[in-house]
Amino acid sequence: MEQESYGRYRLVRLLGEGGMASVFLAEDPVLRRPVALKRLKRELGAQPDWVRRFHSEATAVARLGNPHVVQVFDLGRDHEQDYLVMELVEGVALSTLLERHESPLPPDAAAAIACQAASGLAAAHDAAVVHRDIKPDNILVRRDGTVKVADFGIARLTEEVSRTMTGTVMGSPLYMAPEQIEGRTPTGALDVFALGSVLFRMLAGCSPFEAEHPHAIMWRIVSEPAPPLAQTVPGIDPTLADLVERMLRKNPLERPTAADASRTLRQFLSAGGVSDPIEFVRARVLPDDIRRAPPVSVSPRLVGGTLPDAPPRPAPPSRAPKQGRRASRTILWGASVTAFLACTLLLVVLVLRPTVSSDAAPQSAAPESESFSATSPKAPAPTRNKKRHAGPRDEPSHLRPDAHPERPQPPTDRAASGSIAVTGRDEAPNEGNAIKARLAFRNTGSETIHSFRMTWDLPGEPRRKPQVDAYYAPGCNARIEPRPGGLRLEVECAGLDLRSGQIHPGPDGISLGIHYQDWSTWNRKGASGLGSNAAALPDARIDVGK
């Protein structure tokens, strides 16, 4: 991975993977900044017409230049794959934020997020760019509270290829508009409907057209009116309820534009005393660990070697003006005379100084260097004639802990310099045949950690060994083995650049699935110590790599 590159961009690690593309953290060694590189699947670039449309769409998105749209920096083709280089948004997806909140967002928080997303949509619609796949996964919240919409224009191209390949409609059924399901010509109203569904989800804690199967969801979207928000959320502000109702109307012509929706939401926030939606999201919505996370830095250590810094160019020799040369010669002559007189005076003092007896301490002895005192320690002069007591002070100075207090001592506790704290929760507490463990590994030490291993003992003795799978766990491998009295889970993560305070690979850590055919024969799932809320993982042992 460290050596793999696309164009001039060097891949660092995998951030996420979907059906149509993989997203990597990459480095631009020329501009020295981290970027997100989206590498599209090879089958997407098999047809020249599609490649041409891909370039045209990416170029249109790159021209938007709106602060609420993820910026496109570059695009190209390498290793027979097309790739897109985008702005790296350091923060969290709205989907993750909603999962962590575990409850509907307050109305002002939902409005502060939605009004920024609507502003980005309005800029795109003005440029005749339709997103087609607005959903919480594509709405990103930066650490400073700025909301950005991702994947503009790319959704339409992947939808076309998917329809050609499978004969089905691509997209997220929960947030599709009726005209999108029916195959009608898409307009910006399609994105407004999807954003209305996202706003409903933030306010109510559920989507307006939920059902058990995707086809049932699409049937409800086409056939049934959206449920009134006031019935789902009693006491909701009428302004928000009316806006959501209009955004979810079946007829695209009856919906407000994205600009109108953004304006209405800003007016709602202003009436509630919120003047800056970005600052409000940063201070009141984002969790502390995301808001205070250190930024991704571009350094040689990040990618295993980058272009070396160019040495400073020496300044060209400047010739003194003619009128100043005589003054320069005068100053130089005066300095030489002064130095000669000082040396002469010092020589006279040394010749006339009285001889110092060997029993007396030198009056102006030069201080010993650290290297000399460490190899040839001398007893202090005041205690030379006193009776000495044996003790730790008799040790050579370079072995004493109090020697050279001004020199920083190496850490005596390794855990203080490199340590991992692990918390976990079960994402499917009611699922009878699996533990869906979400484990967050936080670097609580002061040094960057590149590898670690977690060992966790699960109680009980199942008849057969369960299967373990790792999801969203770049650089990590998991295995499970029998042990006396239960099972032992081992998770090894390597190739990291986990700095102090960071969580691998993001705010929610990694996800593991421990599957068993029938937990009733084990009957110890509850004894694992994992609950639905994040807590310190019991009995987990962490070994940090050197």
Image (spheres, rainbow, N blue to C red):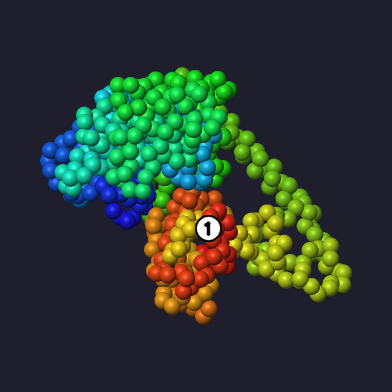
**Percent coordinates x, y for residue 145 in the rendering:** 49, 34
* Relative to 533, residue 61 above or below: above
Callout 1 amino acid: Gly
In the depicted view, which residue is nearer to us: 500 or 127? Answer: 127
* Relative to 119, residue 476 above or below: below
Total labels: the figure holds: 1
Q: Residue furthest right?
A: 386
**Percent coordinates x, y for residue 297 in the rendering:** 44, 45
The residue that appears at 12% across and 41% down in the rendered structure is 48
Dividing the picture into quadrants, the one containing residue 273 is top right
Which element is circle 1 on? strand
Q: Which residue is mark 1?
A: 424
The residue that appears at 41% across and 27% down in the rendered structure is 245
**Percent coordinates x, y for residue 446 in the rendering:** 57, 54
Dividing the picture into quadrants, the one containing residue 341 is top right
Instruction: From the viewer's perspective, tell me whether residue 274 is left or right of residue 516.
Output: right
In the depicted view, which residue is nearer to us: 437 or 524? Answer: 524
Dividing the picture into quadrants, the one containing residue 512 is bottom left
Q: Is residue 381 visible?
A: yes
In the depicted view, which residue is nearer to us: 448 or 346? Answer: 448
Structural crowding at the residue carrying mark 1, measured as other residues with C-alpha within 10 Å and reported as few (<14), some (14–19) or many (≥20): many
**Percent coordinates x, y for residue 23 in the rendering:** 33, 47
The residue that appears at 25% across and 37% down in the rendered structure is 181
